[in-house]
Amino acid sequence: MNEATALHDPILMEVFSNRLLSVTEEMGHTLVRSSFSTNIKERKDCSVALFDAEGRLAAQAAHVPLHLGSLMGGVQAALALVPVEDMVEGDAFVCNDPYAAGGTHTPDISVVTPLFHDGRVCFFAANIGHHADVGGSVPGSISGQSRTIYEEGLRIPAVHIARAGALEHDVIDLIALNSRDAVERRLDLQVQVATNERGRELVADLIHEMGLPAVERALDDLLAYTHRRLARRVAALPDGRHLGEASLDDDGFVGRAVPIAVEVEVSGEDLTVDFTRTGAQARGAMNVAPSATHATVYYCVKALLDPDLAPNSGMFRAIRVVLPPASLVNPDAPAACGARSITCNKIARALFRAFAPLLPAERAMSAGHDIVPAIVYSGPRPADGEPFVYLETVGGGGGATLDADGMEAVQMHMTNTSNLPAEALEHEYCLRVVEYALVEDSGGAGTRRGGLGIAREIAATRDGIVFSARSDGHETGAPGLDGGGEGARARMLYRRRNGAEEELSSKPSRIVLSAGESIRMETPGGGGLGDPGARPAAALARDLADGKLHETNAYGEVLASRARDLIKRARLAQDEDGQSDGF
Amino acid sequence: MPRVGFDVGGTFTDFTLSDAAAGTLTHVKVPSTPDDPSRAIGDGLARLLAAHGAEGRDVEFLGHGTTVATNMVIERRGAATGLLTTKGFRDVLEIGRQTRPHLYDYGQRKPEPLVPRRRRLELDERIAADGEVLRPLDEAAAREAILELREQGIEALAIALLHSYRRGEHEARLAELAAELAPELYVSVSAEVTPEFREFERTSTTVLNAFVGPRMSRYLARFAEATAALGIPGEPYTIHSNGGLMSIPTARRHPVRTALSGPAAGVVGAARIAGEAGFGNLVTFDVGGTSTDVSLVHEGRPLATSEREIAGYPARNPMIDVHVIGAGGGSIARIDEAGGLKVGPESAGAAPGPVAYGQGGEAVTLTDANMVLGRLGASGLVGGDMPLDAEAARAALEARIAGPLGLTAERAAAGIVRVALANMTRAVRAVSTERGHDLAGFTLVAYGGAGPLHAAEIARELRLARVLVPREPGTLCARGILVSDIALDFVRTEIRQATPADWPEIVARLQAMRAEGEAWLDGEAVPPARRAHEMALDARYLGQNHEVRVPWSPEAGDLDDFLALFHATHRRVHGHALDGRVVEIVNCRLRAIGRIEAAGGGEALPRGEMPAPVSVREVYFDGEHGWLATPVHDRGGLPVGAVLDGPAIVEEMSATTLILPGQCATVDAHGNILIEERYR
């Protein structure tokens, strides 16, 4: 062992970690390329990972942060079902249950495959994919108003999906029959099994090249290195305990706000994230299963302290998470937890807030919109009259940092999925996009202002289009930091054909639209950072000239008139030389 | 008759002159002049002609690649640009796909739009997805909008309306109005730049084209003047990012297509040279000072993509798919806070450069590690113009890397090379095995200053069949221009189901596009005998949102033949096919090609006896080998048919080639070095 680095061989470790990344990248490619579900293929709502024989995470390619470490529960469930020494080459396991198998919600199905060398298990290949539907009371299996997990479709504990190299078709048939699209489920499950098989070949190559002892040493090094790297970052923070808070508009049923409170404690190299003060579990599906709560914590720590840190058990070992029982972040069965992503983003808001006083000024960020507003339109398809379901989660304003305004119109935290282009949407569905724009005046005021939210207004082009949504941020806006102002709140408007407008709650269900009627969603802006009075006049002038801002009250009359003056002078300068880029 | 190709890079402009009759290849390198690139072009061409003893009027062909447009975007030095778009959609350019560029790092931001919001104006007009005009264009308002943008001092105007790929008349009318009201403006129209659906990407491409348009037009005009002043007759060509040549009028209309064209030219050159040597399945491996460019060539064809970005802005024109990573000779090695050894992506660049350059660089680089291992000779680069300081490299490496790791200098240096190779290997896997290709039948074509130094190890680890090092590997991009065809890519979105009712429309569209391609080839003055058209359809199963590209022409068969080919292609690319499912056509594509006359070749190559090595030096190899006395050869003296057993080193002006123990190199009939494993 090397004295200076406490690693066996830092060179071999680096070579090995590149190889592990290649393996998970190639597995991820296989999964995305071959799957059929839109969620996996287009939105990349899936992850792949490698674990060692003890169930330690060696490497993960997470396409959405919600899956950080969330395959671990599946591997543990498989190990609980069959002791590692009784596993047979060619076995594979499937599971999804948040309570019985460490899942996060029922549509996320995991497949875990033990990999053998010389007759014993040396690694596990695992992957998770968001399936479009696993049954339950609504298409897509997620509704904010589900009261128990039984309304969220099929629950799968860890069971064999392959035995000694042969697929368990009975199990696949059982899962498929419980879905609204049996054909897709069958295809996707087989792709998930094949993805791990690709992992098997790649790991076999790796062991063949390096030899198992060298692989095991390099993995020990990698986990020790990752742990140490994060511990160093934690040690560099001042000791202390800080509270961060956020709240949900409701728990799935209108009228009851749900508080989230999390305390972060730094003591030397030790980092504790304590949710003891977070409230009771929700009546609806806003609950977060423990593996999703952990994923949210891992995401925040990585984003705030070391964005390039490799996700593996060495990282997780450096963080202690305390979850109270029967709470929003650790519900008791059979609480529903399908709509957890909005809650996860609010947990991230609370964590970013709690970390803010610990971080160097240039790392802190004010709150962004921090929701995952999902809109769902359904009806018959123009091409063939078959039913369509169009789901999109809409971005909003980003948080501000010491050196930059919040980004306009981005996804925050646990999700980063794309929009559907208007030209694709209008071709595929009986829908027309009326407006897709930034929400003016929505960024919280500050030396650096919050990013602007998105307005997305979509009209039905025939009668009988059904609209539902799961959103939040209607009751509280994104708070500012260090004197920055609050970002604008979310709104949803139902525009009738006769011109009447009706403001909707954050979770409208099954509104039937006639041709020409539209729903307009305006997502929240980000919070500002620092005293608005200290905003550079040129930045304010640019916002005014761009029409991103009209209301200057928060900035004070002196600053506003300086900004207007700058605009006038820029116009004059332009008259003189015919060329101006402004301020 | 001399043929000239040159590549205008950010630092150097490289020239190559090929004279088939005389059997010579001549190279000249001059510093670029970014303020007015045509100065370096004029100087370099004059020097090149003088070196070859030729006159401008002798030049039969002149083609060039340029990073001028790319740099303009990176540095945001393009024209003040305005955008006219459909009511409700002015912010599409700024919203983009609503994603943040990095999942975890909030320091990485979406790039600021090239057109600020105050110069993005909306027009009251609307076309539906099926082409129906829902609201006619309000011409009075359009006139006002054009005048207002003109007031704001714009020099270029982008016009991008919703569904214009389906029906372009509103855009065309706006272009007419702009020509009438503000004839001085450079105008880009989305249905002409890239008539493809998905509004953000089409708008972004159109804006990029407008943003670089005015300055590229001036640059191209000065370029044409510079060549005319040298008496060079004929049309000078510009290479585009999909590896084809365009005339100056085409380049002025589509300047965005010149972005990222330098690496594309290198891939074309590599594909042509390897093809002549008999190899069609290739991984190209171009290692420079700061980056490594890797791409895949399958059966002689470079892989293309329409998904690339220029400085974070999507550009939808087809480009050769080049995968870039931050690993090169200047990549910096360091030990991080937790004791890990990292190499790159930070680079010492050309200044101060590696420690061994003696220009004040203090950080240990990959080049310094290669010096310590004896792989790079002290006489250094560029034919000894720049002597290298091996002792300084060794001292820095001992102090900064070897000491803290408790290793000898050579073990630490070998570690740095291994870590860099691990990054490069991962890039090669990303373009090959991750896309389902088995590397066993592939050739690694190594070029750039540092490609041939690392190729042998990459090929051994990934078990490629061989390495091919072309002659003058440092100038391959300029030579690629000499072997490129005149070519332009056309696309039309035509979303229709592949049914007997709609199929004739598809066939008619392809035929119309072929006529469009013919008209363009007329304009480029390509004689009919040299013309070719390659067509393809992008299609998907109904309900999918991603397409598979299927090569197809009306002569290839009927609808059933197409469907069979689509299912087979889908199965190959995605692993499954759904035989009963309705298939939807999305885009029709055409590449119009004017084949150039077989160029290059015929250069005089040394024949005869194998000369003795010019020197023998100690070189460090991994594993059981350690230091080995290694013969060093001068590439210029190696005759056709020469055989070198590894370990061996071959040096030439622009690169050093390393051959490992257990490998064997031969010089083929074209002067390429082929490296293979002696035992398999």
Image: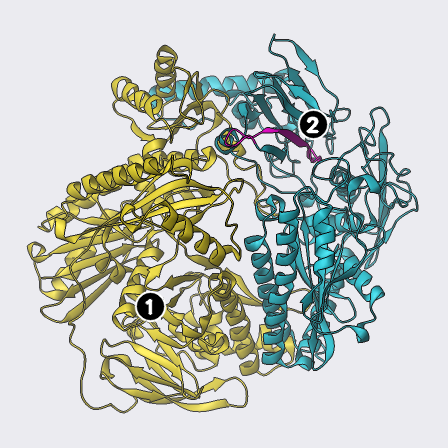
Chain colours: A cyan, B yellow
Per the rendering, the mark at residue A468 is 2
User: To which residue does mark 1 refer?
Assistant: B280
Query: At which x and y percent is residue B386?
Result: 34, 71
Q: Vertical placement of A468 versus B649: above or below?
A: above
- Quadrant location of residue B315? top left
Question: Callout 2, which amino acid?
Answer: Ser
In the image, which residues are magenta? A368-385
State whether the magenta stretch is mostly helix, strand or loop: loop
Per the rendering, the mark at residue A157 is none
Query: At which x and y percent is residue B479?
Result: 25, 62
Q: Nearer the viewer, mark 1 or mark 2?
A: 2
Give the SS element for disc 2: strand
Q: Vertical placement of A401 versus B281: above or below?
A: above
Query: At which x and y percent is residue B241?
Result: 34, 50
Of all chains, the one bearing label 1 is B
Q: Is residue A304 visible?
A: no
- Asked whether A352 or A507 is in front, the reply is A507
Give the SS element for disc 1: loop
Query: For the residues marked 1 and 2, what is the alpha-carbon distance in whole angstroms?
Result: 54 Å
Question: Can residue A580 be found in the magenta stretch?
Answer: no
Of all chains, the one bearing label 2 is A
Question: Callout 1, which amino acid?
Answer: Gly
Query: Seen in the image, is B426 located left or right of residue A340?
Result: left
Q: Residue visible at 46% across and 35% down?
A: B198
Q: Quadrant of the N terminus of chain A?
A: bottom right
Q: Is residue B178 visible?
A: yes
